[in-house]
């Protein structure tokens, strides 16, 4: 395994008065695939560029392996980066593009022309672009350009691989294919990878761990399943998942009173709060008969998606979404009863938006 | 709809052709006068296809070889001055433009403003102090002095022009090279310069033409016959009491030929360079 661990310690970066990255701490293990996920402007790309050395943090240190690289030039860090627009040099052939990282350091790495050629051809074969080596870079399709960019990032056998939304310029079909290839390649080679995307499907399918970012901060760091099932913050719950997690505001007294809730939920474990958010993913609810239902609502509209359908249900003033594969004939305005999988329900503190955990799992 | 489109195309064509004609006609006139015997020009007029029997290069030979006018020396001097005064500032300006476009350093906005301010100084304003400076430096009436002068002016505007051109090169290309371990000079030489070729050529053509056409500085700083430039020599083709229009026309065509050839050869790059980043990625 040739990867190196990465450690970010208290990284802060400001652009004039805007705080782009706010005290970020992150540890990436050797050979791990980590995805920085978040909406645009959340600081994920800036974080990546700080690891690459293209931005200098105002505060904090960056370690690759055991070396403090904070003050090192990008070229001295042994990282490779794939850019969103691929950054293919348009005046060079594919061969020269892939060979570029080797030729600029040929003397330092003591590489002969033959060594370089061998390594370029080997990487090109691995990515299935060896027949394109003599082409001008401008004559390539999007998918081919992407492969050239990946090849260029691989040829130097770096310790760390950084990718800035490398799939966002590909069309949907190729994206799926390249996504799988990237994951396979990363696992085979064991290169530590930091991957930036705003696409949660990409994040969930690629990552060993996901760092969800918002407003310059890492909100939650964990394996994809944990991010999905056990969000620690309302932002994570509503950013991840299509459609996102339903958030229902409830009052807390002796019992928890949620709109449409027919069931008594003991409120004694939520003492000190007078309101909570109940979070439940659309697929963790089931349409049932009146007597089995936990929630009662009115069908607002049904969206068929082929294999499944999304039922929009209005409960008082709240609109929630239910994803189901059940074959149902529902009309807008019909009364509907839902059974909630309480094991999967999450409660949040409305003032901090932090998760209170699955306090009610035991009551189901 | 279709008819209106047709009318527009026709009107546009007429306008463009008329404009081209207005521009080209004087040149055609001079060309005709330079290859026709003077008598024929007087008697039959110049706007016609010249008869092959009387077509002559006498005026050209006379202008280039007669020691009285010595246009050939002027031409040679101009080629030297204009070429060197193009290469030096372009090289210097390319380096400066790279720094302004891609590097962060203190006082960058101020320095850049200074360069723009430098471009706005009228040449006439500083000619007298320059004259004294040149005399005391001992480079008055030398081609080197002339080259220095034009290079100095050229660096300022070429830096401005090239910096704006380099800004069109996607930043990710430079950052990618930087992550791959290329030094700034390597990025400059292997990534930025090859991509800036249209801009460099456009700047070179403009600078070369500018230096070539200069008469003002040449009149002030070059006095001896063997150092004078072609623009100074052309004037001598016109006598005090008699003007041989054929000779003068031939001299003008010779003088114009250099910039004209440059524009024809580099037209493609020139358009790209002026229009900005033209490479499809």
Image (cartoon, coloured by chain):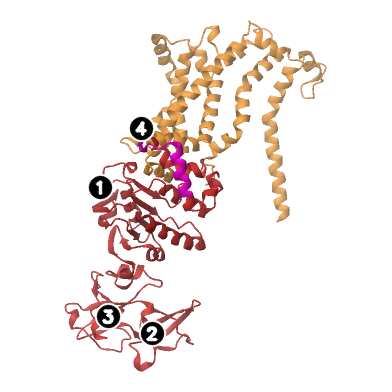
Task: Measure how far apart labels 1 and 2 are at the Cα level.
Answer: 50 Å
The residue that label 2 is drawn on is A286
Check residue A58 in the rendering and tell me which mark sits there, or answer none.
1
Question: Within the image, what quadrant is residue A355 found in?
Answer: bottom left
Task: Measure how far apart labels 2 and 3 are at the Cα level.
Answer: 20 Å
The residue that label 3 is drawn on is A250
The residue nearer to you, when weighing B185 against B57, is B185
Question: Dot 4, how many residues are within 10 Å of its Cα: few (below 14), some (14-19), or many (20+)?
Answer: few
Question: Within the image, what quadrant is residue B135 found in?
Answer: top left
Residue A198 lies in the magenta stretch = no
Question: Dot 2, how many residues are within 10 Å of its Cα: few (below 14), some (14-19), or many (20+)?
Answer: some
Q: With respect to residue B198, does A35 lie above or below?
A: below
Tell me whether marks 1 and 2 sit on the same chain: yes
Is B67 left, or right, of B193 in this rendering? right
Which residue lies most toward the top here? B67
The residue that label 4 is drawn on is B111
Query: For chain A, what colour was chosen?
Result: red
Q: Chain of mark 3?
A: A
Magenta-colored span: A108-124
């Amino acid at each position: 395994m040739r990867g190196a661990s990465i450690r970010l310690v208290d990284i802060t970066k400001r652009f004039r008065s805007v705080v782009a990255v706010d005290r970020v701490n992150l540890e990436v293990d050797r050979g791990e695939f980590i995805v920085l996920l978040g909406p645009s402007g959340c600081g994920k790309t800036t974080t990546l560029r700080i690891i690459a050395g293209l931005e200098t943090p105002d505060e904090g240190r960056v370690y690759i392996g055991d070396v403090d690289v904070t003050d090192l030039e990008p070229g001295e860090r042994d990282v490779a980066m794939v850019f969103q627009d691929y950054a293919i040099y348009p005046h060079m052939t594919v061969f020269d593009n892939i060979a570029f990282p080797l030729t600029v350091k040929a003397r330092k790495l003591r590489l002969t022309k033959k060594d370089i050629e061998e390594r370029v051809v080997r990487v090109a074969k691995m990515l299935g672009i060896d027949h394109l080596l003599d082409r001008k870079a401008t004559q390539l399709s999007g998918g081919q350009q992407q492969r050239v960019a990946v090849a260029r990032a691989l040829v130097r056998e770096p310790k760390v691989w950084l990718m800035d939304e490398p799939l966002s310029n590909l069309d949907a079909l190729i994206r799926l294919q390249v996504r799988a290839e990237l994951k396979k390649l990363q696992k085979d080679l064991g290169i530590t990878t930091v991957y930036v995307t705003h696409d949660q499907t990409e994040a969930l399918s690629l990552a060993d761990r996901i760092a969800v970012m918002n407003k310059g901060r890492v909100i939650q760091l964990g394996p994809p399943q944990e991010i999905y099932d056990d969000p620690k913050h309302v932002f994570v719950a509503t950013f991840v998942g299509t459609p996102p997690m339903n958030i229902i505001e409830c009052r807390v007294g002796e019992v928890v009173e949620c709109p449409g809730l027919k069931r008594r939920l003991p409120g004694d474990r939520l003492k000190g709060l007078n309101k909570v958010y109940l979070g439940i993913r659309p697929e963790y609810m089931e349409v049932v008969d009146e007597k089995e239902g936990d929630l009662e609502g009115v069908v607002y509209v049904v969206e068929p998606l082929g294999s499944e359908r999304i039922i929009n249900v209005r409960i008082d003033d709240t609109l929630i979404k239910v994803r189901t594969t059940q074959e149902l004939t529902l009309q807008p305005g019909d009364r509907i009863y839902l059974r909630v999988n309480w094991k999967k329900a999450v409660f949040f503190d409305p003032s901090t938006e932090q998760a209170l955990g699955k306090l009610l799992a035991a009551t189901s | 709809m279709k008819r209106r489109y047709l009318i527009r195309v026709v009107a546009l064509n007429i306008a463009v052709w008329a404009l081209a004609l207005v521009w080209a006609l004087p040149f055609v006139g001079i060309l005709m006068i330079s290859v026709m015997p003077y008598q024929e020009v007087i008697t039959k007029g110049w706007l016609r296809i010249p008869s092959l029997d009387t077509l002559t290069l006498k005026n050209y030979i006379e202008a280039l070889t007669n020691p009285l006018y010595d246009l050939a020396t002027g031409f040679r001097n101009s080629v030297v001055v204009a070429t060197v005064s193009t290469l030096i500032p372009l090289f210097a300006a390319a380096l400066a433009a790279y720094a302004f476009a891609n590097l962060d350093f203190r006082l960058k906005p101020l320095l850049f403003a200074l360069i723009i301010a430098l471009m706005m100084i009228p040449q006439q304003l500083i000619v007298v102090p320059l004259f004294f400076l040149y005399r005391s430096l001992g480079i008055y009436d030398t081609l080197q002095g002339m080259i220095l002068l034009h290079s100095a002016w050229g660096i300022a505007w070429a830096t401005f022009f090239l910096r704006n051109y380099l800004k069109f090169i996607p930043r990710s290309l430079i950052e990618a090279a930087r992550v791959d371990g290329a030094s700034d000079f390597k990025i400059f030489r292997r990534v930025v310069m090859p991509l800036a070729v249209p801009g460099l050529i456009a700047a070179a053509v403009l600078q070369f033409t500018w230096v070539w056409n200069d008469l003002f500085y040449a009149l002030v700083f070059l006095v001896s016959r063997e150092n004078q430039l072609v623009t100074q020599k052309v004037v001598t083709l016109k006598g005090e009491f008699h003007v041989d229009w054929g000779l003068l026309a031939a001299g003008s065509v010779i003088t114009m030929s250099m910039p004209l050839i440059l524009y024809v050869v580099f037209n493609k790059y020139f358009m790209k360079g002026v229009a900005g980043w033209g490479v499809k990625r």
